Image (tube, rainbow, N blue to C red):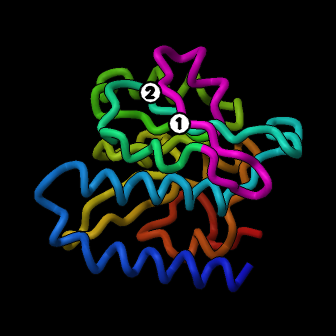
Amino acid sequence: MRRGLFHWLLRATALFAVLPALAGPPSGEYQIKAAYLLNFARYVEWPAGRLPAGAPLRICVLGRDPFGGALEGLEGRQVQGHEVRVRQADNLDQAADCHLVFISGSEERRMGPILRGLSERAVLTVSDIDGFVEAGGGIGLVIEEQRVRFDINQGPLLRDNLRASSQLLRLGRQVFGAERGGR
C-alpha cells in the first residue's frame, strides 16, 4: 500500500507541477480532476455487498459533463481488482447504481435533494461545487494556489460504510466529520 501511495503522490506531484500551465483551458483542469476520481476509487473501500469481487466499478457524472473526454481514459482501468466503467447518469436512479458519482456544477441547485437521494446507498459523492462537503458531500475538489486539492467529509463516508484509507485522509486539505484516522 505504501508503494502504491508513493506512486500516487509522485503522479499527483507531477500533475501539480503542470497545473499552472493548464489552468487556462478547462479541459486541463478536468483532466487532473479525472485523475483524482480514479485515485479516490483506489483509496476508498466499498462494502463487499455493494461492490462484490470482480464486479465493475462504475464512475458516473450526474449533470452536464465538464470533463470533455478526459474520463474516457479511465474506462477499462483496474482499481482494487475491479474494471472501471464510466457513464453519464441522467437521473438520480441511474446515479444510485454507481459507486462514485461526480455531481456537476449544473446540479448545484439540486445538490441537497441529490445528496439525500444518494444517502445510505454506498455511493462516494464528489464535486467541485463550492461548499460541497459542508452541504454533506463526500469529497469536494477545490482550486487552491492554482492547484487542485480536495476536502473530505467523513460523515457521509462512514454513514455509507465507505472506508477512506488513512493515506487519502492525510492528503486531504481539510477533513471534516471524524478524526484523520482511517484504516
**Within the image, what quadrant is residue 99 found in?**
top right
Whichever of labels 1 and 2 marks the residue nearer the N terminus, that label is 2
Q: Residues within 10 Å of mark 2 (few under 14, many from 20)?
A: many
* Image coords of residue 160 (percent x, y): 72, 41
Disc 1 to disc 2, how far (Cα)? 7 Å
Q: Which mark is residue 101?
A: 1
Residue name at image x 70 percent, y 50 percent: 158
Q: Is residue 2 above or below residue 175?
A: below
Q: Secondary structure at mark 2?
A: strand
Disc number placed over residue 62 in the picture, else none: 2
Quadrant into which the N terminus falls? bottom right
* Residue 139, numbered circle: none
Above or below: residue 4 compared with residue 130: below
User: Vertical placement of 104 versus 34: above or below?
Assistant: above
Q: Position of residue 165 (x, y in %)?
A: 69, 67
**Amino acid residing under circle 2:** Leu
Which of the 4 image quarters holds residue 181?
bottom right
Front residue of this view, candidates 36 and 72: 72
- Residue 45 left/right relative to 90: right
Instruction: Report the amino acid beneath label 1.
Output: Val
